[in-house]
Image: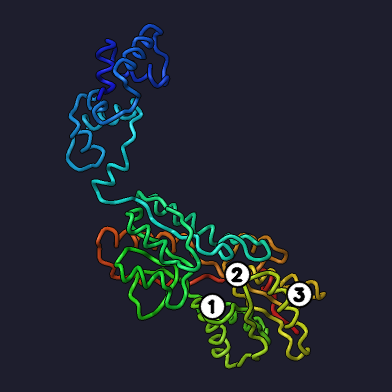
Amino acid sequence: MATLKDVAQKAGVPILTAYHALSDSQPVDAPQKQRVIEVAAQLRYRLNITLRDVSALANVSVATISYVLNNSAPVSPQTRRRVLDAIDALGYRPNITARNLKTARSRMIGYAWHNVYAWRKVADGYVNALLDHFLYSVTLAAEACGYRLLIFVEPPDDPVSAYEELINTNRVDGFIISGTNQDDIRIRRLLDLRFPFSSFGRANDSWDFAYVDVDGAQGIESATSHLLAQGHHNVAILGWPEGSLSGDARMRGYGSAFAAAGKTPNKAWIVHTTNSIHHAYEETGNLLSMPEQQRPSGIVCFSDTMAVGAMRRIEDEGLRVGVDVAVTGFDDDPIASILRPALTSLQQPIDTIAAQMIDLLMAQIDGQPLPNHRIMLAPELIVRDSSRTPYRG
């Protein structure tokens, strides 16, 4: 098979001239260009820069080129510079597929887009920026380690099949998992297969796997304690349906705050509903319709989405958010600071979560020990006008 060097020699021009003539990357004398094109046609050569072309231009062996690219053996600074200059001049791009075959790695991390409702929009069309931020941060952390994300769809009726197919076809070196549930079957299957993965969230405290999670119980406890400290005795909570790991943990935080204050919440203040503006709006109306002595003057919400619904209903009832009824959210979505009044919310350290998840995954892929692989991070309560004013009711 002909090379660029063969074309250059037969056309009687330098290698770089042949390259410029065939790539149109720089002007070439018309007769020379025509001669190069004719020779390329005779040799049935199509421009495809290889290691042999780089070695010919740099005047070093193919092995030396490989040493420089893979940093696998000592090379003098002068030789390295010559090789890198040749690579740049010829626009050489390593054959990633061939390199991955040698290292037995795909350089891909799988991530399932498994729940459009949770990850893109809630029922009201409210975009979930927190999880967009998570994906962006994970992608940046993965690329810093030389990996890309492979996004795939997780069938709701058979979620494990997509993971098994990617493993069996050697498409990925590991997985990032989110949206975990109690006894999550994806995690159980990956543990059984002993395949590398790290998770944003827990699944079963008796299972030993790598995860990073946010301490939702501590977060909701701090938000509830904040409202109690502001003088709100009747503090309600808008939570998710029972049965989710993160939801149940957050609800425990609500109870812990009351216990620490020596108080007991009214059962009517504890609301379980879906994570939507509409349902939060409706449930807030029910709370505000309670007799005056029992009516909440503070509402802790499991998400900023629910907090938006609560704030709308408070205002529609002719009450003032942050004065008559205080509200807190969770996630510190970008809209939290621009709402009027601005929303008090719990900020999750998403960049740290993503970086630590990738670190845990890379350690597994590289066969390194994982001494600390169950990481819990505390959210930070960002106090704004929706709860800043002490209650004087």
Residue 250's place in the image compared with 124, above or below, is below
Residue at image position (72%, 71%) is 311
Q: Which quadrant of the figure has residue 118?
A: bottom right
Residue that label 1 marks:
247
Residue 94 coordinates in the image, percent (x, y): 31, 37
- Between the C-alphas of marks 1 and 3, the distance is 24 Å
Residue that label 3 marks:
314
- Which residue is most to the right? 318
- Say which element carries label 1: helix
- Between the C-alphas of marks 1 and 2, the distance is 16 Å
Name the residue type under label 3. Answer: Ile
Q: Which quadrant of the figure has residue 141?
A: bottom left
Name the residue type under label 2. Answer: Ser
Residue 359 shown left or right of residue 119 in the figure: left
Of residues 164 and 228, the one nearer the viewer is 164
Marked residue nearer the N-terminal end (2 or 3): 3
Residue that label 2 marks:
345
Marked residue nearer the N-terminal end (1 or 3): 1
Residue 138 coordinates in the image, percent (x, y): 44, 57
Residue 113's place in the image compared with 377, above or below, is above
Name the residue type under label 1. Answer: Gly
Residue 345 shown left or right of residue 375 in the figure: right
Residue at image position (43%, 60%) is 354
